[in-house]
Structure formats: C-alpha cells, structure tokens
Image (tube, coloured by chain):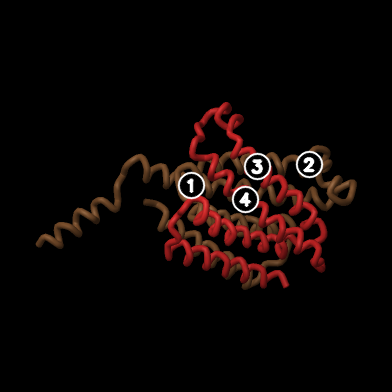
Amino acid sequence: MITPLSSILLVFVGSFFGSFGAVFLKAGSGSLKLNIKSFLLNWQLHAGIFFYLLSSVFFVLGLKKGELTILYPLVSLGYVWTLIWSRIFFHEPLTRTKFVGLGTILLGVVVLNLGNR
Amino acid sequence: MKAVGGRLSQATLSVPFDAASAAKRRSLILVFCCTLVGAAAQMFIKTGAGRLARPGFLGAVLGMFTNPLLFTGYALYGLNTVLLAVALRDNELSLLYPVIALTYVWVCILSVGILHEALNPFKVIGIATIVMGVAILGRGGRS
C-alpha cells in the first residue's frame, strides 16, 4: 500500500493540534478532583478535548488512505511540540533525562518506521 | 566529616516515601494504562475508518456516531483522556507525555497479531528502543 502525501500532511496538522490538547489538559488538571462535577465544569479540560477531537478528525482522514504503521509515527512530532509548550506555558525544567528519554523514543519510532518499508 | 554528613542527609532526602512521590509513581502507572487504552482505540479507528460510508470531512464526523467501530474507538479515547488528565495533575507534562509513545509498541504488536502485518528486525529494534526511552523517563520521574 502506498501512503499519499495528502495523508501525511493531514496527520502532520493533526499532531500540531493534538499537542494543544495536551497543553489544555495539563492546564485543567491542576484544579481537578475525582468527581463528575469537577470534570464537567472544567473549561480547560473541554478545550483540551476539543483539540483532541479536532486532531482525531485529521487522523481519521489521514489514516483512511495509508498504512497505520507508516502514518502513526508522524504523530510523534506532537511530543516535540509538547516539550516546547511545557517549557513556555508551565515553566517545566528541560532536564537531560527528558532530552535523552525523548530522543531515544523518537529514534525508536524512526527505526520502527523503517520496518514498514 | 561535615561533607559526608551533608551527602548522607541529601541521599535520605532524595528518596522520600511521601504522598507527592507516591502520586508521581501513580501518574506513571496511569499513563501506562493510557497507552493500552489508546492502542485499542487506534485499532478500532483504523478498522472503522476503512469502512466509512461517506468520504471527506462530513463522512468522518458522521462516522463517529454511526459506525460502531469508530464510536468504540472514540469512547476509548474519552477514557484515555480522563486517565491522562488525572495523571497530569501529579506530574510534569514534559515527562509524562513522551511515555505515551508506548502506544506505538502495543499498536505494532496488535498490527502483527490482528491485522497480520509482517514483523521484521527493524520493528523489533524500534520497539526495544522505544521501551528503553520510556524506561529512562520512568526512572527519572519516580521521585
């Protein structure tokens, strides 16, 4: 099966929107309590879910015409966006452990991708 | 002697068994559960997306509610989101988020097992490397 460029672009855009889903989820999680009311009244959580849904529509359209095991690794770009946003929005320290861990994971994703050629 | 004493007390402080570090460990376990749920969701969406009645954007939105496979996939994503939100409360986003890459490992295993995609050395090495990266983050994120 050949994976078209349009599918690759759709998944790319999806990964960008998805990273904002993570940002809003993190922002909303601070005031989160383990009851239904707390989940329903949290607008940041809703914004996060909105971005996840938005990215999921792009993923559904993107995955329609390609191999899951080729397109899915592209989602890993979302981890790079998220690392940048967590520094900018939440002032989290970017330690060597995080860079080495994420770098190793991304390398693994690329190697996994090579196995699908 | 003073330096040794200082180092000892520092070592004692670096492994506290308090509520905060227990919550951080729990957050890693929650994200681990997220990856299993997320992989199952991916498999349902992949199977469902191939059977969409209508093409394009509208077809995708309608499919979420009319296609049982897509609906199940998105319901699992909902569960995934709740678990992730609870996990993020107790730990850093930059540490927890890359752990979600474990989903690739489960998807690859499920693709071989259910969709009968071929397994090869690249996939095996890729899986092992991802697991190693997650282990590095996991070790750094426990305390």
Residue B105 located left or right of residue A34: right
According to the rendering, which colour does chain A have? Answer: red
How would you rate the neighbour count of disc 4 (Cα within 10 Å): few for under 14, some for 14-19, many for 20 or more? many
- Report the residue at 61% width, 55% height from top: B103
- Mark 2 and mark 3 in contact (Cβ < 8 Å)? no
Name the element at disc 2.
helix
**Amino acid at the residue labelled 1:** Ile
Name the element at disc 3.
helix
Query: Which comes sooner in the sequence, label 1 or label 2?
Result: 1
The subunit letter for the residue under badge 2 reads B
In this view, the residue in front, B41 or A78, is: A78
In this view, the residue in front, B134 or A90, is: A90
Residue topped by disc 4:
A20
The subunit letter for the residue under badge 3 reads A
**Amino acid at the residue labelled 3:** Ile
Residue topped by disc 1:
B29
How would you rate the neighbour count of disc 2 (Cα within 10 Å): few for under 14, some for 14-19, many for 20 or more? many
Residue topped by disc 2:
B64
Name the element at disc 1.
helix
Instruction: Report the Cα–Cα distance between label 4 and label 1.
Output: 23 Å
Query: Which comes sooner in the sequence, label 4 or label 3?
Result: 4
Residue A116: image x %, image y %? 71, 69
Instruction: Report the Cα–Cα distance between label 3 and label 2.
Output: 15 Å
**Amino acid at the residue labelled 4:** Phe
Instruction: Report the Cα–Cα distance between label 1 and label 3.
Output: 22 Å
- Report the residue at 45% width, 54% height from top: A92
**Amino acid at the residue labelled 2:** Met
Residue topped by disc 3:
A49
> In the picture, which chain is brown?
B
Quarter of the rendering containing residue A38: top right
